[in-house]
Image (tube, rainbow, N blue to C red):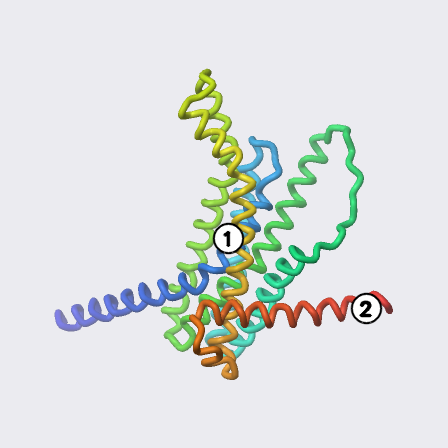
Amino acid sequence: MASGFFALLDDIAVLMDDIAVMSKVAAKKTAGILGDDLAVNAEKASGFISSRELPVLWAITKGSFLNKVIILPVAFLLSAFLPMAVIIILVLGGLYLAYEGAEKIYEYFFPHEHAKHAISLEPLTEEQILAFEKEKIKSAIVTDFILSVEIIIIALGTVVGKPIPTQIIVVTIIAIIATVGVYGIVALIVRMDEAGLKLISMSTKERSFSKTIGNILVKALPKVIKSLSVIGTIALLLVAGGIFVHEIDFLHGILPQLPSIVTEFIIGLAIGLLVLGIVNLVKKIIGKK
């Protein structure tokens, strides 16, 4: 009986070690897309008055957790009964990521005019402000749903073939870390300017340490969000390229003379531009009709 108990402990130890290893692999695979997730959510959670930033961010965070509660069971059922669907969704997600990354680069070099909206100088009513908040929260949660699907499927792709309990634990850990990590960092980012203003107000001297740090934080916020957008775009193409290289047999071992990260970026960008061209062509055809 004692030997059976110790054998059980040994099995649990092996399982936990396997989960830890697979969680590290899954975290590494999904880390790229988190840059874009971070940039998108930082933009979605900004633009509110100071007192409403954290409540709005908390509402988005709760929506993100609900998204994952919906997505995770579906992903596990597919993995258990239709594992090939996980690979197909993974590649389709890669196409979307590559398209999104290529579109951002194309828009940077060839910007097009956006529709101009009339700007009202009249102050908004409380009802209008609440309606604006609800609309932006809804938009952020929808965007989070798409990004959550990509994160979960990529994480699931790293443990396909493993026992279902291992898949459930590993992917659930990644989903929780992604949500808490991303929205925790977003909370810090959107409060940078507020923290900077408090540091500035703490000193009456023209040149003081607190005022210097405060000015840096206030000026850094837009630059941080912009840099996250750039990093996120590169990450999108790297993640997409990695999916294509590992899941499409034709692309195995392509460009062996280059480092893998360069190869994945080139393939991600090339396929992204191809998808972008097809999408734009379809839009033109539909527009003419």
Q: Nearer the viewer, residue 106 or 232?
A: 106
**Label 1 Cα neighbours within 10 Å, binned few <14 / some 14-19 / many ≥20:** some
Residue 76 position, x and y percent, is 47, 69
Q: Residue at x 53, y 48 (%)?
A: 227
Report the quarter where the C terminus lies. Answer: bottom right
Rendering quarter of residue 121: top right
Residue 219 lies, in percent from the top left, at 53, 35
Q: Residue at x 51, y 51 (%)?
A: 38
Q: Are marks 2 and 1 in contact (CB under 8 Å)?
A: no
Residue type for callout 1: Phe
Q: Which mark is residue 65?
A: 1
Q: Residue at x 49, y 75 (%)?
A: 245
* Of callouts 2 and 1, the N-terminal one: 1
Q: Is residue 242 visible?
A: no
Q: Which residue is mark 2?
A: 286
User: Quadrant of the image for the N terminus?
Assistant: bottom left
Q: Tell me, yes or no, if residue 117 can be seen here.
A: yes
Q: Nearer the viewer, residue 72 or 218?
A: 218
- Vertical arrangement, residue 250 with respect to residue 64, above or below: below
Q: Residues within 10 Å of mark 2 (few under 14, many from 20)?
A: few
Residue that protrudes farthest toward the bottom in the picture: 250
Counting from the top left corner in percent of width and height, residue 71 is at: 53, 62
Q: Amino acid at mark 2?
A: Ile
Q: Secondary structure at mark 1?
A: helix
Please tell me which residue is depicted at 48% across the width and 79% down the height of the picture: 254
Residue most extreme to the right: 289
181 or 248, nearer to the observer: 248
